[in-house]
Amino acid sequence: MKIAGFFLLLAGWALVVATLALLGSAPARTGFVLAGIGVEIVGMILVVRSHLPVREDRG
Amino acid sequence: MTSSGVGVSETASALCFVLVLLVPFAIVGLALINTGLGRSRSAAHSMMASLMAVAVAALVYFAVGFSWQGFAGGPTHAISLGGKAWNWIAAEPFFMRGLQFDSSPSSLIAPLQIFGVGLATLIPLGAGADRWRLGAICASTALLAGFTHPLFANWIWGGGWLSQLGANYGLGRGFVDAGGSSSIQVVGGLTALSLAWILGPRRGKYSAVGMPAAVPGHNAVLVAMGCFLATVGWCGLNSAGTILFAHGEAARCILVTLNTLLAGASAGLTAAAITKVRFGKPDASLTVNGWIGGLVASSAGCAFIKPAAAVLVGIIAGALVTFAVEWLEFELKVDDPGGSISVHAVSGIWGVLAVGIVAHFPSSMPGADSGQWLAQVIGIATLIGFVLPMTYGLNWLLNRVYPQRVDIEGERQGMDLHELGADAYPDFVTHADEFIQR
């Protein structure tokens, strides 16, 4: 889960950078930058969850 | 034309040099805050680690860091993407051999950045307090000062691709950060988060069911003193950054100083008010952390926001710090004794975003009037999507070859005795463990 999370962080950033290089129109650029940030948020959630300690009361 | 390609007047250079000399107060302030918020049995270790970190940062930045950060108009490596040149790392000679030590901006950037990177390296110390080994601190500091910080600093201050977003893609003035909310504070804060994850919580911090135990700081006086000193240093850092990185005129330093003070003060008061309402009494450590959070948030836009907006930035930063500290400790189980992640990463990101919302740029500053918020958001995406994985990966690899966490005996005994052989307060019995026969 941790590796997948960091992969998604990098993938989201790559999407942001690729958007700048490939898209010309402002609305499309804005949309894809926000989509990249969305991917980063999913990655961050995975990274955070992978670092949560396993609680003993969960069995 | 000076060697930096962007000239400043002799008066501005002289003022800038004086301002640079104020920045060590921020370093001292942060060191005192980290020490005061840690345990008494690790106090000497904390101050020693701060000294070592600043020393390592200065030498490594001198050797390689500056050559990779560079300055606007200096030699750089660029790649072409979509027909635009993207400067991604500077190509200065190592050991600052390309610098002329005159009054040019590039020669002033060198000492400012040595202090700036020193400040950045103290941020993770707050998160790793009471369990991070001295040798590992030096090694991790070398990575931060030698590569992580210079790379991002090049992108925003060295003429790199983030600063070019305005010229290349019409996004406002490109990514703007006058005083280092991103390159110093967020980079340091994300490194602190990485290290808190890698080191794990202090022994006894969390119960078996995940409930955190309160481990209060040992000296509120040191913490408050550090806050006052840091405020002076921040005024110097933000003002010097405005002249050297945002190309502001010397007179703008008055506005910068006012904004810095207002943001810090309003953030501190906000944190005090929130803790008073929630816990019945204002919390000293959270108030100080809130104040520092306001200073951190003020850095990015200090030169381009009105004083009323600085108050707003500070209020939001103070509230963010207060809730982020609790959220990290209770929900995410991240043990951050100094509150470094909340103060520097969370507030820093807010400060960067605030530039895109409340900043007003002078008409003399080249760039478009729209799209500034998107440039700032792209910078934040780069910090979280690139800098965090990179700094985590570097410190994870370091931990594999050179374990960063002290052993169980060292943590029980205290870092002072275990690593330095002497307590910070030898005349006083300050904790029960000292009764245990060694």
Image (cartoon, coloured by chain):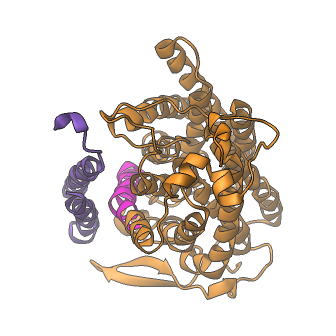
Range drawn in magenta? B368-390
Q: Nearer the viewer, residue B52 or B78?
A: B52
Magenta span contains residue B378: yes
Q: Position of residue B197 (x, y in %)?
A: 39, 53
Residue placed most toward the observer, B90 or B291: B291
Q: Main secondary structure of the magenta part?
A: helix
Write down the colour of chain A: purple
Quadrant occupied by the N terminus of chain B: bottom right
Q: Quick check: A13 left or right of B66?
A: left
Q: Residue at x 54, y 85 (%)?
A: B91
B184 sits left or right of B164 in the view:
right
User: Which residue is painted at 57% across and 63% down in the image?
Assistant: B137
Q: Nearer the viewer, residue B381 or B308?
A: B381
Left or right of B379: which side holds B247? right
Residue B243 appears at what percent x and percent y?
Answer: 68, 58
Residue B367 percent coordinates (x, y) = 46, 59
Q: Residue at left 63%, top 76%? A: B60
Residue most extreme to the front: B437
Query: Residue most toward the left?
Result: A59
Q: Quadrant of residue B431?
A: top right
* B107 or B430, nearer to the observer: B430
Whether residue B295 is in magenta: the answer is: no
The chain coloured orange in the image: B
Examine the rendered structure and indicate whether residue B367 appears above or below residue B155: above
Viewer can see residue B252: no
Instruction: Please tell me how many numbered marks the rendered image carries.
Output: 0
Residue B333 in view of the camera: yes
Q: In the image, residue B9 lies at what x, y percent?
A: 77, 65
In the picture shown, does residue B221 fall above or below B108? above
